Amino acid sequence: MFLTKLVALSVLSLSVVNGQGTDDCPEIPETGVTIGDPVPIRPEDIPAGCSDFEILVARGTSEPNFVGGGGKFGIIVGDPVYPASSQIITGVRQGSKDVVNRLKSQAAACPNQNFSLVGYSQGAAVMHAAAADIPAELYGRIKSLVMFGDGYLKLGASQSKFPAGLNEKVRQVCAAGDPVCDANGTCTFFHLTYIRPEFIDPAVDFIVQKFSQ
């Protein structure tokens, strides 16, 4: 499934699912990744051309960018261009601007293309910031928004954090215990588990369903 490949980008998630620790809060193992370091995106990795659907995935802090998502099955998968570093304020501003510019340029060049916006952790903040600046005339082209470990969407709380024209298209994915999105969460380990099928599979189904409507 295409979204499985997207979320599998997380080096941390790939390593952490086998971590050891207490039952309540498993230990986060050493991965060799320095959290906070920027990860640049090469211009040649940015998908080109038109497709039926484009899925923009804003990665979490220090995640690598997705490579090789161009055009298969009528789907283009691409990353917003932003450093995903510990410089969150400037990074989110840069990433959200890139998302909006990408949507505008692709919508103009590809009149039949529709979009899904996906964000994980800091990437979810990118999508929130972008949504505030997306022209209303593009709302109909955005079929779904899926947020993993989103600090703006709290587990069990009323969700109205996106513009009204997009709110009904949002799916929140929050692991119980994740301190970023669960107000009662205290274990960072759970913020790094979104690669698991119980989170990925329903998100994939949601995106497919929305694209099919």
Image (cartoon, rainbow, N blue to C red):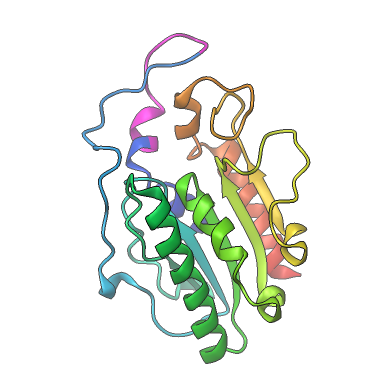
Q: Residue sitting at 45 percent across and 25 percent down?
A: 189
Please tell me whether residue 109 is drawn above or below residue 211 in the rendered image. below
Q: Quadrant of residue 212?
A: bottom right
Magenta span of residues: 13-24
Q: Is residue 18 on the magenta stretch?
A: yes
Q: Nearer the viewer, residue 127 or 75?
A: 127
Please tell me whether residue 206 is drawn above or below residue 17 in the rendered image. below
- Counting labels gives 0
Tell me where residue 102 appears, x and y as whole percent. 47, 76
Tell me where residue 56 appears, x and y as whole percent. 50, 65
Residue furthest front as drawn = 89
Quarter of the image with the C terminus is bottom right
Q: Quadrant of residue 184?
A: top right
Q: Residue sitting at 55 percent across and 28 percent down?
A: 178
Q: Nearer the viewer, residue 90 or 152?
A: 90
Q: Is residue 42 visible?
A: yes
Q: Nearer the viewer, residue 63 or 205?
A: 63
Tell me where residue 41 appears, x and y as whole percent. 28, 64
Q: Residue sitting at 57 percent across and 62 percent down?
A: 117
Predominant secondary structure, magenta span = loop
Q: Is residue 51 on the magenta stretch?
A: no
> In the displayed structure, does residue 41 sit left or right of residue 50?
left
Please tell me whether residue 201 is drawn above or below residue 24 in the rendered image. below
Tell me where residue 42 appears, x and y as whole percent. 25, 68
Q: Residue sitting at 52 percent across and 66 percent down?
A: 55
> In the displayed structure, does residue 188 sit left or right of residue 166?
left
Residue furthest top as drawn = 22
